[in-house]
Amino acid sequence: MDILRIATAGSVDDGKSTLIGRLLYETKSITKDKIEALEAASKRKGLDFLDLSLLTDGLIAEREQGITIDVAHIYFSTPKRKYIIADTPGHFEYTRNMVTGASNTKVSMILIDARNGVLEQTYRHFFIASTLRIPKVVVCVNKMDLVGYSEERFNEIKASVEELASKVSFEGQEITFIPMSSLYGQNLSTKSDEMPWYKGLPLLEELEQFHPETAVGASHSARFPVQFVVRPKTEEFHDYRGYAGKIASGEFAVGDTVTVLPTGQSTKIATIEKFGQKLETAGPKESVVITLETDVDVSRGNMLVKSDDQPAQLKEINAKVCWLDSQALTSGRNYILQHGINDSKAKVVSLNKKYDVVNHDVIADFSELKLNEIAEVTIKTAKPIFADKYEDNPSNGAFILIDEFSHSTVGVGFVL
Amino acid sequence: MSNVSIEKDVEVASEAQPKWGVFPRELEDEAIYIIREVAAQFERPALLFSGGKDSITLVRLAQKAFYPGKIPFPLVHIDTGHNFPETVEFRDWLANEVGADLIVRYVQDSINQGKVKEETGKYASRNALQTVTLLDTIEEFKFDACIGGARRDEEKARAKERIFSVRDDFGQWDAKRQRPELFDMLNGRISIGENVRVFPISNWTELDVWNYIKEEKMAIPSIYYSHKRQVIERDGMLWADSEYLNKDADEIPFEATVRFRTVGDMTCTAAVSSEAVELDDIIGEILAAEISERGARIDDKRSEAAMEKRKQQGYF
């Protein structure tokens, strides 16, 4: 059974929480006691309808303010697959959460209130979806009930979103538009009877027929970051040395010639194991233990790659960075750069250009990168980083920046 | 073993099953990756073991993560003294079976030391008290990371929890100060005094756990299966009768055929009427259930923010 991870983004009050609540409701993923709790809570708030947003706004502060503050993870299943929704706040201050929530996902659902149409936010959402190279974007034009289910209004919004998207979307990115009313369940799991003019699929079917493994962005370059060296030192496994890790991308097979980075030593794969079970091959996202034919020096943070397809060993990285911390990034400051499970001391040596997502512009001259801002920067590292360009291989092309003193994760970068 | 049947041989049904009866293997790969990161990034990790199905799943995952090596950290149980005897018996058996060190600390000791006060009244429970014992245990052993079996689908405050959840000196969770987690990169760097709670099965649902237990043919405590037990009825739920439960005069115990869907203390976990004797029966019940798993946790019902408030205090 596979999993599809989705990020949702929208602005305040465009009905995102209601949409998710409705999806859970229509796929029978919420139980009677939760609905009862919801009825009671809705009543306490003086509402005469079921406030499905109360399902997702889990924190006291969120319920008080009636807005989503933090990324929430929501789960539902259909007979076909499991879905994980990263529900990210649409409030303009929280770009940080949007990038975070969307980082693991293959589908971005962007909500637009049919009355308001395109907002400043909409461009930001597309910009982030493209920065993360999310292969599929579903634009949910919501609250169609409030514009009389008008086809003209839908087409108008679609045209203006398409114009915006054309500025940032990349080749192969699928963009789909669905008119809907999450409050009345129009075009969620079943086709709307109010909008016969819409010939596409309702939302759930649109998601069901999407296959991320064949979408744009999947890389065949084999990358295996070594997490942990397994050395049991028991009688039975006296000389056993296995390298445990999760395959970042591509596929490995027994007998493949591999190179260890950074040492450059080459050898062959002797076994690929999972809890003692021997496999012939293993693919992306699988956690395995690999043993090698010859005794070469391998430790945590090293990477096994196929010898004929190696990533660059970078000590100077050009990257697009999104800043996640209230203390701004400044040139010349030291951070810890973590790429996968490998890390190094790092210094930002130049700030190259900043994206102005409000005016759709770039700024060449700037001295710091503030919370929620995105820029291209150059970073030097003390140790080599074995990264691919993010656009070639997203699974091996991103890194985080960590503050040396607070230990907080303060930035995320995409290798250019 | 005693009359308690701990191990159940599970036959995996051979006929084609609908997909919701299949465990998504990606979740196992993800959890193993997280557990390996804990062993690599921390000096003194521990696995918080309650004897419930989620922590049993964690033990299985840890076993797989390091095989053929042993689990490189101890199992830690905070024993409230109100645990089901079947759970405690199972705990000892499992620790021995996987060859892991087991550390047990007692809430009763914290009570004796005057650090916490026993609750009174008919809803009295030691659930909230165990936080103090847990924090003391973390301090005693200088644990820098504690692996727990919490899942995001259990409760809405937990839906906001990180995989690596940094806690301050007092074990407190601050929802607004959480670190962003991007892709699968886990940042376990902490300052002195801080520690991290780690939740490898964050993305699993209750059904995923049961499907995994079934596919892995894992042993679970017998109380998860249907059995006869003395219970009382209170607030529309069945409560296991025990010496720890404060009963009103009109709450007369009677025998019922029940099982437990979630296993906490005897004083704060309700039973459900059930005839489920096989894992398939349990899975069928969950699919049909109208009450969510934590709906049987009386401790969560204290208020809408009960879980968030307990997490702020250091609960995991």
Image (spheres, rainbow, N blue to C red):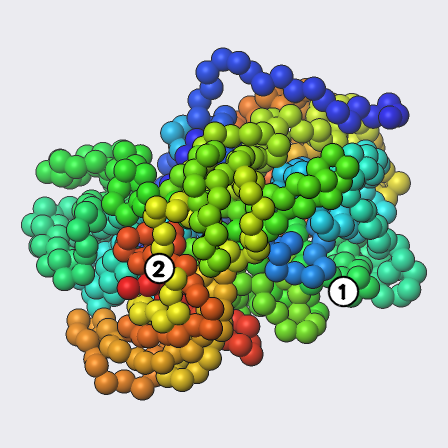
Give a yes or no on whether discs 2 and 1 share a subunit.
Answer: no
Helix, strand or loop status at disc 2: loop
Which percent across, then down, holds residue A171? Answer: 17, 51
Q: Chain of mark 1?
A: B
Can residue B169 be seen in this snapshot? yes
Q: Nearer the viewer, mark 2 or mark 1?
A: 2
Q: Secondary structure at mark 1?
A: loop
Residue B207 shows which numbered tag? none
Give the residue displayed 37% in from the left and 83% down from the top: A331
Image x and y of residue A322, in percent: 35, 69
Look at the image and tell me whether residue A97 can be seen. no
Q: Nearer the viewer, residue A293 or A221?
A: A293
Residue shown at the point (62%, 17%) measured from the top left: B11
Q: Which mark is residue B142?
A: 1
Q: How many marks?
A: 2
Left or right of residue B106, residue A239 in this image? left
Above or below A321: residue B151: above
The residue that appears at 45% across and 61% down in the rendered structure is A339
C-alpha distance separating marks 2 and 1: 40 Å
Circle number at residue A312? 2
Q: Amino acid at mark 1?
A: Lys
> Farthest residue in the right direction?
B112
Place of residue A87 in the rendered image (x, y in percent of width and height, measured from the top left): 40, 54
